[in-house]
Structures are given as C-alpha cells and as structure tokens.
Amino acid sequence: MSKLPSLSQSAKERLLNKALDAHDQKKQKQETLPPNSTVRGLFGRKFNDKLCRFDQFDGYKEIQYIELGGKSLGVSSPFFKKHDGIAGAVSLINGQEFINFSSYNYLGLGGHPDVTNAAKNAIDQYGTTVSASRMVSGEREVQQQLEKKIAELYSADDALVFVSGHATNVSTIGYLFGPKDLILHDALAHNSILQGTQLSGATRLSFKHNDWEHLEDILGRQRKDFERVLIVIEGLYSMDGDIPDLQKFITIKKAFKAFLMVDEAHSIGVLGSQGKGISEHCEINPHDIDIWMGTLSKSFASCGGYIAGESALIKHLRHYAPGFLYSVGISPCLAAAAISAIEVMQNEPSRVTLLKERGHYFLRKAQEAGIDTGKSAGFSVIPAMAGSSKNAVVLSNKLFERGINVQPILRPAVEDKAARLRFFMSSEHTENQIDFTIDCLASALEEI
C-alpha cells in the first residue's frame, strides 16, 4: 500500500479496510486434517515451514496490516506511551505533563497516600506474594477482609477474589455452565464474557445492545430447549458509557427462571450516591441479581476481580472454579490497597459526587460543541465519535500534541465507522482541563 503514492487518502483507507475485511473472512475458515489421516500417515507428509512460524499467525499478520496501513496514511501509532509516574487526571509521559483521559483511575485513588501506605504495610507483614493457591497455601487475613468488604458493598452473603478481572469472567462462566445450557449476552459484552461462554460449551446468543425486548423475544422462543440459562449484562458499558434498564432485565430473568449476571467493572465506585454501583443507581434490591462481578483495577486502585452473591455460589466457586483453585491467591499488598480504596470511597463520598459532576460537565460541553458522544450517560466513560479508524488516530495524535492524552478505539475492536476517542473521567479532573480539552477536540475535528 505504501507503493501507491498516487492514490488519495480516502482511496487508501478503502483499500486498507477491504484488505482487513478479506483478512477477517480468511480467519473465519477452519482448516482440518483429512478425515482418514492417521499419526503413522502424517509422518510421511511434508509440512510447510509456515506452520511453525509465529510471523505466520493470523494475529501477527493483522498487526502488520494495521501498521502498514498507518504508514501509508501518514499516521503514527498512538499506543504504548510510557508513563513516568501515577496516571491520574494528569500524567507524566516521557517527562512531559499531560491532561490524562486514558486511565481507569475514576476516584483518583491510584496513588492516594492511605491506599499506598496500606499496600506498603501489607508488604512488610506478608511480603509481595502468597506464592501459591489459597487452598494449597492457606489464607491471609487481608484476603478475607477484602472479600468481606466486597460482600458488604452488595449486601451479599459472601464474595470471592480472583487475581484477574478478565479471568474472573472466564473462569466463573466457563465453570458454572455447560453444553446443555444457554448463555445470552448483550451484543457489546466484554471479551472476557465471550471467552467464558466459549469455554463453557453452552449455546451462545447475543441480544441487541441494551434491548431487553429482544432478549425477551429470544427467551420466548429458546428457553424450552435448555436447562440452565444465564443472562449477562454490564452495569456501565466501557465502549459507549451507557447504562441498562436493570429492573427490566430482572423482571425477564424471573419470568424465564434464568440467572442474571451483572459485570460492574466500570460501574462500581461510579454509579449511585455512595458508589455502590448500578443497584444503588437504579434503586433495586441487590439480591435480585444472582451473580455480581467487578474488578479492583478501576475505582479501587488495585488489580484483580471478584464475584459476590449467595453462599452456595461462592462456596462452589471457592472449591472448584479453575481460575481460583489453580491460580495463586491475590497478593496481600493488592488486597490491602483495595480495602483501603473502598474505605476512602465510603469515608469521602464527595469523590463519587465529583466524578458524576465532572462526567456530566464533559458530556454537556462536548454536546454544546457539536461533538458526537454516542449513547454515553456522562459518568466515567464518554466517547467522541471520529467516523473512521484513521480519523480516530489522527485526533488522538493532534490532542497529544496539545498536551492531552486520550486513546483511540479502532477496528477490529469496533466497526471502522464507529471508531472513536474514549475519554475516561476522574473525580480529579478540573473544569478548566475539560474546557481546554473540548476546545482542542472541536478544533481538531474541524481540521479533519
């Protein structure tokens, strides 16, 4: 593509997208061995060297396509920037200070002195790791304290902490459900939900984004053909920043005798006057949700994931969920940091209030400037639609030149026409920072 200098930029973009579409179609084709092949017969075959080269993997080729396309369009990569310290509302990148909208530090607790000191004290007492599975190596009090804190947030019987948010969904969904079951998820569900569903072997169907009527229609036709049914939604969607009508989904799950799981990765610490998440925001009984899931890496300034719910669920996962049973236990310093972050949130509810105020302010100012913010409700996640992957990268780079760090979301994560910049808000962002950002963004959009 770089050898076609006479083509216009728009023509190059069309060629790049056409190449990526062809690549996607090729990737979907499954190659299998001939039906009558035997191990003995295979030794006589000559295999292509490409079959044992990493540079021939589809994923690597896709990266090459994207990099080549970026070069041909004269666009440099905005990814993998090196931060020199704590990434909050501002961050040092290569020694220069930037207004930062690319971190999940929603309540500004990453680097909070109480949180940092709690982690340091835990290292002094327990070291940096527990070195083995909790069932094998035993418990640490700080791990149990964290699970008690999380259970209290949801008024749940118990909770269980995993070392990875992604692995929490994969292991929980993958273990609890099987081939006789049906899993229904929102069309914009996180990759970890899809991976967990695939691992389970259950039948997977998606319903239109936030469309409870479509879900009800599917269940009306499909429920009779399966044993257990799981419905999975998110409390606040990380791409669009919008929120489901939780009560509608509860009504449907009760009517069809299904389980309802809510992923609160981006809504805990964000929604509700006290940061208790979507149940508080929608004023529903948290016991109406069968499986609460969340992460510790966003509002709670740590790392890991958790499940909260009734005792039978948690005991079941504690003894058999592979991602817990066969994984090292959460590091004591990370558990201590999360406990401290929850306590700071509870003691300083103004952080939750301020996050909401800053999010609403950003959304209002962006819309007044004519910026397309999609479906965002104006809390912690606000997209700015760019129209194409190339535009999103150009916008990101232009803002970076003005001292603003925000990352683009491109295909294949979203369709090319749905590419956007994704702004993550923090309670520590100021109105002046937001005003400056909106002015720069509106100006950059006019330029392209």
Image: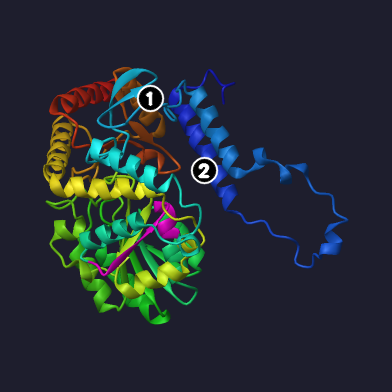
Residue 4 sits in which quadrant? Answer: top right
Q: Position of residue 356 (x, y in %)?
A: 14, 42
Whether the magenta-drawn stretch holds residue 244 is answered as no
Residue 103 sits in which quadrant? Answer: top left
Coloring scheme used: rainbow
Q: Position of residue 222 (x, y in %)?
A: 38, 76
What residue range appears in magenta?
156-170
Q: Position of residue 251 (x, y in %)?
A: 21, 72
**Is residue 258 at least partly visible in the picture?**
yes
Which element is circle 1 on? Answer: loop
User: What separation in Å lies between label 2 and label 1 (alpha carbons)?
Assistant: 38 Å
Which label is found at residue 84?
1
**Is residue 270 at least partly visible in the picture?**
no
Residue 255 sits in which quadrant? Answer: bottom left
Task: Looking at the image, tell me whether mark 2 or mark 1 is earlier in sequence order.
Answer: 2
Q: Which residue is mark 2?
A: 21
> Depth check: 396 or 110 in front?
110
Whether the magenta-drawn stretch holds residue 157 is answered as yes
- Judge left or right: residue 393 versus residue 32: left
For residue 187, above or below residue 414: below
Q: How many numbered discs sit on the rendered protein?
A: 2
> Depth check: 89 or 415 in front?
89
The residue most toward the front is: 125
